[in-house]
């Protein structure tokens, strides 16, 4: 028995040695994969043979040759074929399916819209097919462009296996570079932004290196400018971009959370930008002292040093803060809130960001055309910003909660002593019929039955702006009377007193009311209207133009884009379907977005939300806040309740405890803001672009406008699952 075992072992050793010798012998067989693989095959020389390999096979063979000291053996030959067979089987089991994006409105398929999607580009995509050669070390890929912009290209080629997202490569345009004005389009550095495969082909989106030769950039921009006409444009992409822009503008216009852009390295002066749109002003009401907002109640020191989400309680007894990543602290803070009257709970969401100002060269350059100093200051501020902090009042969700048994000590917030700044607001489109000029002249304003002395900030031929050192509550659209004191002393030809003006903007901040007025030109005599026109025209050369419209619109583009890029909440849009029924039309897709079954379940809340919106008066500043609590049972069905349906602490506790036992459960703070029908008409640039594209795609343009005009509300979901759970898990 032992002799048989020894003989068997000797035989196995002999066969193994024979196999090693066979694999080490030089191979005289060529590898020809032409017609056998989806990728492009090129000729390669090694082992005295010509082989036809795709990119993946070549790299495998190259690695094996290095292992065998450059000798082309049977071991190399068989290992290449074996590796390709294994990888081919794996590819067949992981075929990717490409989903086409379509703008639609159906209650059975809620549309997901990416604010930061790669298709949403600032540059127009030009559909143009031209050969390209991709250089990756010593491997060449031949393909053709599907569309081109000055900053990126989309390329189709035979299936590749070795490229990955983020890879660097060089791109040559062999046909375009034969033209003298495009001679530099050879070996331009690009990186792989998106890569998609099907059975036979690969599609790449390549992003050009912005630091490459400026002449190359100019040649690409010139070519794109020459081909920027409807017959070359990707109309579906253009319409998609316009749609995304309008969704984003609506979101920014209906924000209820003030946005602070902070420099984490400057605790004394961290606020580099601050947006406060009209719909978010009421959020800061609990911070008001003598009608003015006291930002010293916000814990900017803790925000900058901790750089994590915080819960803030403001009540008549003090200001307290808890870290969001400490459930015991949150439970104690919520307990304290439940025991006090006139108490408010705020979620301070902190998001670390990294801004590349190169992405906003266009917007900064537009500002620099008129105000270069401001543009330089803006660029410096953008480079300093490292944190976005939003302030959301979630008090409506923190009612009827069970008391916890947490004994954590909550922290009292000392008043912040740093520098504050005047808030700006999102206004992407500003249409000024007349230019404004920085003119300071003495006036008297009669408002609410009281006359005030003031000095103008700027004046146009049809309006003016001023500031008053007190709180003057003026309704938009109301009338005030203006006396031009100094100008009336200089002329007796026209009457410049008791002129009627409409209030177009009014904001009280830091002890001053800032007012924008437009003259009632219809109710004013021709001679008065002519006086302002002639006076400004005569002195135009000596006047400095007020370029706030350019600054505000371009800053809105910059900060609106950044909000979309770093979105941590889930905006959604309520509209009408083709049958004129109210639906959840779209949800902005983020890393927080949930599967479609949850959004289909949310369709059942639309009627309730619509009724809530009809209750308050018709005012753009009105917003509605409430909690939404949901969980998925074992059958996959979603159960959803809102604060308006839960009538007692016991009822709310039963539902939340049931939700906490489920694997999939979510609690949200929901805010709703009504959308004015007139808002779409105010988007002058959007309407201009839709008009330009209407002749080339009339049906799609008509459908888009119909969808936009059907919006009646914008909502936003803020995840608070951990906050609400804190009181139920700390017992």
Image (spheres, helix red, strand yellow):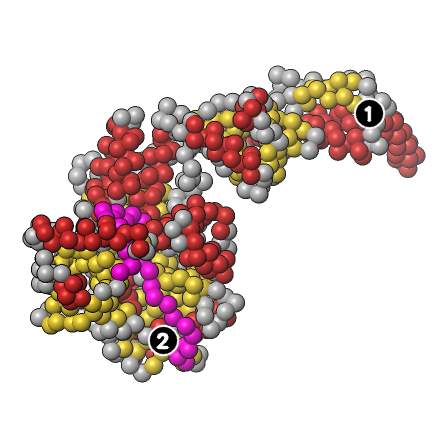
Quadrant that contains the N terminus: top right
Q: With respect to residue 387, does 340 lie above or below?
A: below
The extreme bottom residue here reads: 317
Q: Is residue 563 left or right of residue 611?
A: right
Name the residue at 16% across, 59% down.
503
Q: Quadrant of residue 696?
A: top left
Foreground disc of the pair 1, 2: 2
Q: Is residue 333 left or right of residue 686?
A: right
**Span of residues in magenta:** 414-439
Q: Is residue 100 left or right of residue 151?
A: left
Q: In this rendering, does residue 390 appear at all?
A: no
Q: Which residue is mark 1?
A: 73
Q: Which residue is mark 2?
A: 297
Q: In this rendering, does residue 483 appear at all?
A: yes
Q: Position of residue 553 (x, y in %)?
A: 33, 51
Q: Position of residue 117 (x, y in %)?
A: 43, 42
Q: Residues within 10 Å of mark 2 (few under 14, many from 20)?
A: many
SS under mark 1: loop
Name the residue at 30% across, 78% down.
315
Out of 706 and 219, give the one closest to the viewer. Answer: 219
Q: Position of residue 115 (x, y in %)?
A: 39, 46
Q: Residues within 10 Å of mark 1 (few under 14, many from 20)?
A: many
Out of 445 and 340, give the one closest to the viewer. Answer: 445
- N-terminal of the pair, mark 1 or mark 2, is 1
Quadrant that contains the C terminus: bottom left
SS under mark 2: helix
Q: Quadrant of residue 320?
A: bottom left
CA gap, disc 1 and disc 2: 76 Å
For the residues labelled 1 and 2, say whether their Cβ atoms are less than 8 Å apart. Answer: no
Out of 1 and 689, give the one closest to the viewer. Answer: 689
Q: Give the dominant element type of the magenta stretch: helix, strand or loop.
A: loop
Q: With respect to residue 620, does 588 lie above or below?
A: above
């Amino acid at each position: 028995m032992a002799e048989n075992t020894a003989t068997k072992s000797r035989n196995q050793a002999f066969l193994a040695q024979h196999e090693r010798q066979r694999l080490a012998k030089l191979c005289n067989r060529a590898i020809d994969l032409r017609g056998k693989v989806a990728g492009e095959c090129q000729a390669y020389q090694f082992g005295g043979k010509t082989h036809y390999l795709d990119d993946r096979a070549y790299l495998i063979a190259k690695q094996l040759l290095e292992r065998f000291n450059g000798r082309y053996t049977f071991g190399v030959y068989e290992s290449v074929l074996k590796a390709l067979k294994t990888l081919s089987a794996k590819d067949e089991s992981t075929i990717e399916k490409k989903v086409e994006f379509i703008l639609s409105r159906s209650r059975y398929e809620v549309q997901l819209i990416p604010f930061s999607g790669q298709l949403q580009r600032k540059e127009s995509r030009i559909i143009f097919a031209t050969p390209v050669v991709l250089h990756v070390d010593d491997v060449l890929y031949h393909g053709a462009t599907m569309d081109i912009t000055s900053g990126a290209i989309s390329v189709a080629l035979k299936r590749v296996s070795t490229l990955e997202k983020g890879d660097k490569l060089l791109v040559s345009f062999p046909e375009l570079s034969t033209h003298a004005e495009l001679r530099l389009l050879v070996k331009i550095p690009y990186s792989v932004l998106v890569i998609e495969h099907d059975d036979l082909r690969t599609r790449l989106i390549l992003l050009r290196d912005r630091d490459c030769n400026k002449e190359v950039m100019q040649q690409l921009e010139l070519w794109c400018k020459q081909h920027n006409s409807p017959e070359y444009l990707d109309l579906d992409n253009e319409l998609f971009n316009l749609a995304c822009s309008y969704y984003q503008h609506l979101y920014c216009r209906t924000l209820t959370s003030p946005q602070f852009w902070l420099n984490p390295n400057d605790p004394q002066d961290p606020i580099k930008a601050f947006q406060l749109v009209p719909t978010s002003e009421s959020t800061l009401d609990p911070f008001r002292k003598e009608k003015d907002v006291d930002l010293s109640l916000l814990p900017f020191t803790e925000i900058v040093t901790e750089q994590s989400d915080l819960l803030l309680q403001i009540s008549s007894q003090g200001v307290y803060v808890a870290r969001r990543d400490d459930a015991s602290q949150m439970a104690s803070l919520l307990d304290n809130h439940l025991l006090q009257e006139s108490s408010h709970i705020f979620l301070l969401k902190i998001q670390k960001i990294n801004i590349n100002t190169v992405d906003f060269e266009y917007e900064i350059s537009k500002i620099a055309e008129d105000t270069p100093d401001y543009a330089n200051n803006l660029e410096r501020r953008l480079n300093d910003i490292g944190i976005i902090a939003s302030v959301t009042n979630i008090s409506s969700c923190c009612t009827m909660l069970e008391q916890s048994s947490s004994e954590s000590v909550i922290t009292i917030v000392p008043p912040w002593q740093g520098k504050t700044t005047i808030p700006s607001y999102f206004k992407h489109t500003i249409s000024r019929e007349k230019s404004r000029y920085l003119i300071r002249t003495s006036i008297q304003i009669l408002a609410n039955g009281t006359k005030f002395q003031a000095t103008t900030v700027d004046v146009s031929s049809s309006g003016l702006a001023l500031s008053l050192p007190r709180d003057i509550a003026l309704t938009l659209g109301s009338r005030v009377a203006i006396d031009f004191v100094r100008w009336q002393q200089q002329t007796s030809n026209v009457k410049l007193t008791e002129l009627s003006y409409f209030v177009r903007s009014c904001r009280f901040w830091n002890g001053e009311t800032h007012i924008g007025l437009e003259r009632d030109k219809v109710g004013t005599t021709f001679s008065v209207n002519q006086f302002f026109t002639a006076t400004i025209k005569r002195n135009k050369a000596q006047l400095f133009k007020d370029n706030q419209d350019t600054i505000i619109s371009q800053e809105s583009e910059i900060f609106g884009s950044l909000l979309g890029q770093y979105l941590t909440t889930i905006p959604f849009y309520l509209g009408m379907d083709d049958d004129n029924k109210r639906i959840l039309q779209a949800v902005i897709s983020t890393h927080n977005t949930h599967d479609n079954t949850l959004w289909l379940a949310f369709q059942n809340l639309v009627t309730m939300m619509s009724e809530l919106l009809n209750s308050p008066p018709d005012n753009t500043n009105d917003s509605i806040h409430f909690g939404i609590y949901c969980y998925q049972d074992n059958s996959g069905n979603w159960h959803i309740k809102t604060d308006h349906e839960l009538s007692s602490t016991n009822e709310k506790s039963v539902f939340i405890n049931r939700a906490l036992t489920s694997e999939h459960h979510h609690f949200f703070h929901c805010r709703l803001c009504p959308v004015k029908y007139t808002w779409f008409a105010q988007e002058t640039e959007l309407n201009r672009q839709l008009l330009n594209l209407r002749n080339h795609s009339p049906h799609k343009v008509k459908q888009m406008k119909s969808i936009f005009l059907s919006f009646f509300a914008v909502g936003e979901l803020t995840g608070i699952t951990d906050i609400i759970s804190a009181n139920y898990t700390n017992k």
